[in-house]
Image (tube, rainbow, N blue to C red):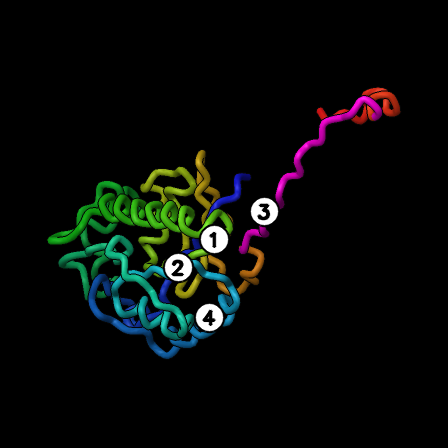
Amino acid sequence: MVSVATLLLLRHGRTTANADGGLAGRQPVELDETGRGQAAAVGERLKGLPLAAVVTSPLIRCRQTLELALPGAEPVAEEGLIECGYGAWEGQPLKKLAKEPLWPVVQQHPSAAVFPDGESMAAMSARAVAAVRAWDARISAEHGPEAVWLACSHGDVIKAIVADALGVHLDLFQRIVADPASVTAIRYTPLRPFLVRLNDTGGDLAGLVPPPRKRRRRATKATDSDAAVGGGAGVAR
């Protein structure tokens, strides 16, 4: 596989809305005690990784996650990674939303789902994928193919990015899981992306750092004496 930069997608830790069964959307909900513990724990897993950049959704739950996980980092806010605009659905209990006519569309045909006074899921997917691909190209150009960088975002956003990396239709993205504080790794090569890790909540992340590239040794031209001794077998081919 061509040596390329590695993107780590980090979902924020559990929030008060997650715990209460509500749809937070773009509301300023914060991490609960469990979420803060999750953020600290993933920070231990990320410790020591040479992150070339840290990018984040501007919402407070992502910023809090990074403050706890990577206290020395200086995250850059990226609007393309913000949560889907659920419009009038924001702040509503999921049990109530499950009775809405739009609910089965969101679950089975999300590419056609447009939230009332909000965003379409197709638009969310397009801008999130465009954002991470643009950042990945920029980081690769500035830091080289061994670079590792991190983007902190939200469940549906991460699932949409993963669906694109797998080359599957957005209508299948509900089959993908991205738990709170999980890490997903993707490498974008010139021909296709590779999903290296998905929804990892406890594995060792050190293996995701690409090894330094080995310099190729220049082939030496055989001399007349080489050919006489080796009968041509030693000539580089």
- Residue type at mark 1 is Ala
Q: Secondary structure at mark 2?
A: strand
Q: CA distance from mark 3 to mark 1?
A: 12 Å
Q: CA distance from mark 4 to mark 3?
A: 27 Å
Q: Is residue 131 visible?
A: yes
Q: Where the C terminus falls, by quadrant?
A: top right
- Residue type at mark 2 is Ala
- Rendering coords of residue 91 (x, y %): 19, 66
Marking on residue 53: 2
Q: Nearer the viewer, residue 32 or 104?
A: 32
Q: Tell which tag, 4 or 1, sits nearer the viewer.
A: 1
- Residue type at mark 4 is Gly
Q: Nearer the viewer, residue 90 or 79?
A: 79
- Residue type at mark 3 is Arg
Q: CA distance from mark 2 to mark 1?
A: 9 Å
> Bounds of the magenta span?
209-225
Q: CA distance from mark 4 to mark 1?
A: 19 Å
At label 1, counting other C-alpha atoms closer than 10 Å, the crowd grade (few under 14, some 14-19, many 20 or more) is many
Identified at 26% across, 53% down, the residue is 80
Q: Quadrant of residue 21?
A: bottom left
Question: Closer to the N terminus: mark 4 or mark 2?
Answer: 4
Marking on residue 213: 3
Q: Is residue 220 above or below residue 59?
A: above
Circle 4 residue? 43
- Rendering coords of residue 63 (x, y %): 31, 69
Circle 1 residue? 147
Identified at 53% across, 39% down, the residue is 2
